[in-house]
Image (cartoon, helix red, strand yellow):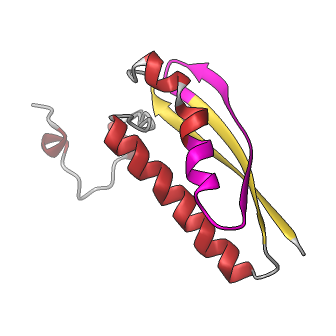
């Protein structure tokens, strides 16, 4: 049968306990292998910078049925989110910079942003 492969990335908050970071690949492997027809290929810490720990995971599913694959993708992703939540692992939040008040929409008063 047909095998479909998926690569996904996750970035964890830089404040995450390093001992929890080390366990992430095993966590991902357990979640993928719990799903029918799914096989775990790899998960690894791809990059570390000031905003967090970036992981990449590669997994596959033996199925010719695309909708079944999409449902399984959903189950794998939500499984990872649930596992992170129960382990106290936080996803990184992208840093948003406000460069200049001139870029703000006219209806957003500067006072609403906490300036005096």
Image quarter (top left, top right, bottom left or bottom right) of the C terminus = top left
Q: Could you say which quadrant of the image residue 94 lies in?
A: top left
Please tell me which residue is depicted at 39% across the width and 51% down the height of the picture.
82
Say whether residue 103 is left or right of residue 39: left
Please tell me which residue is depicted at 23% across the width and 59% down the height of the picture.
107
Judging depth in this view, the residue of 64 and 35 nearest the camera is: 35
Q: Which residues are magenta?
A: 28-53
Say whether residue 48 is left or right of residue 19: right
Above or below for 107 versus 14? below
Above or below for 59 versus 66? above
Please tell me which residue is depicted at 50% across the width and 25% down the height of the picture.
21
Say whether residue 113 is left or right of residue 63: left
Residue 43 lies within the magenta run: yes
Above or below for 7 versus 25? below
Please tell me which residue is depicted at 59% across the width and 35% down the height of the picture.
26
The picture places residue 67, in percent across and down from the top left corner, at: 67, 82
The picture places residue 78, in percent across and down from the top left corner, at: 47, 59
């Amino acid at each position: 049968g047909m095998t479909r492969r998926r690569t996904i990335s996750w970035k964890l908050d830089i404040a995450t306990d390093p001992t929890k970071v080390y366990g992430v690949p095993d966590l991902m492997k357990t979640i993928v292998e719990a799903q029918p027809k799914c096989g775990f290929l790899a998960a690894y810490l791809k990059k570390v910078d000031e905003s967090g720990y970036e992981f990449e995971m590669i997994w596959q599913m033996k199925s010719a049925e695309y909708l079944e694959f999409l449902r399984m993708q959903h189950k794998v992703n939500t499984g990872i989110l649930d596992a992170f939540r129960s382990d106290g692992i936080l996803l990184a939040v992208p840093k948003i910079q406000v460069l200049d008040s001139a870029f703000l929409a006219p209806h957003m008063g500067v006072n609403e942003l906490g300036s005096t």
